[in-house]
Amino acid sequence: MTNFALPADSPEDRDRRLWLGVATVASGAGLAATAVPFVASLAPSEKARALGAPVDVDVSSLRPGDLRTVEWRGKPVFVLRRTPEMIDGLARHDALLADPQSRRSEQPAVARNALRSSRPDLAVIEAVCTHLGCVPTFRPTPGSPDIGAEWPGGFYCPCHGSKFDLAGRVFKNVPAPTNLTVPPYRFLSETALLIGVDPSA
């Protein structure tokens, strides 16, 4: 039987080892190049997050009176840091509201209260009018020539005139039938909340 092994120090053996080394490095690089996009594809896409994946919101820079809009499930969600004056004002106009106790409205159990939130200073409210799905505007200043002198501040839908207070509660005699929806959410810390998860989880 003929032995085809090359001497260890022959030029042919060195060439073969060089090519084996190059092939090994190229295979490793190819595997890494394939693995990185594959691993990245396991994370939820932007579309998946918009369709229902929970959304992290950093509220550390949200000052009293500030409103931020984020997207969850393809819908805008208002995150409002209420001032002490805003919180106090919410107790003064129940007589103007259609459902002040939010009995006919959608909110998680932890937000089934007059402020419709688990923390008094932070309101998390879907920015979708319950009449025809328009996005209400933020009108926090009390009194308004175009809304009415009794306006305590809140959210106003200019499309058809629906009005909601700073807890998303609907006023009487407007087209919107119910309060704005409060999505499920929970706080991860004092400065971070997660929208789209069961608060009791």
Image (spheres, rainbow, N blue to C red):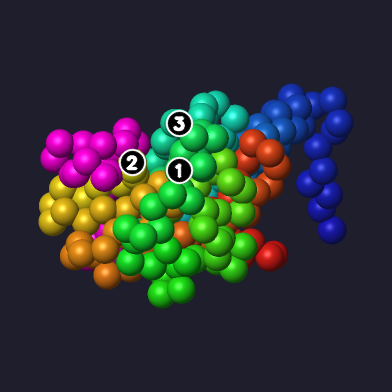
Q: Is residue 18 visible?
A: yes
Numbered disc 1: secondary structure: helix
Numbered disc 3: secondary structure: loop
Name the amino acid type tagged 1. Gly
**Residue highlighted by disc 2:** 153
**How would you classify the magenta stretch by its main secondary structure?**
loop
Q: Whole-percent x and y of residue 135? A: 25, 50
Observer-nearest residue: 127 or 38?
127
Residue range of the region highlighted in magenta in the rendering: 127-151
In the visual, does 102 lie left or right of 75? Answer: right
Which label was assigned to residue 89?
A: 1
Q: Earlier in the sequence, mark 3 or mark 1?
A: 3
**Residue highlighted by disc 3:** 65
**Label 2, label 1: how far apart the Cα atoms are:** 9 Å
Q: Earlier in the sequence, mark 2 or mark 1?
A: 1
Q: Quadrant of residue 7?
A: top right
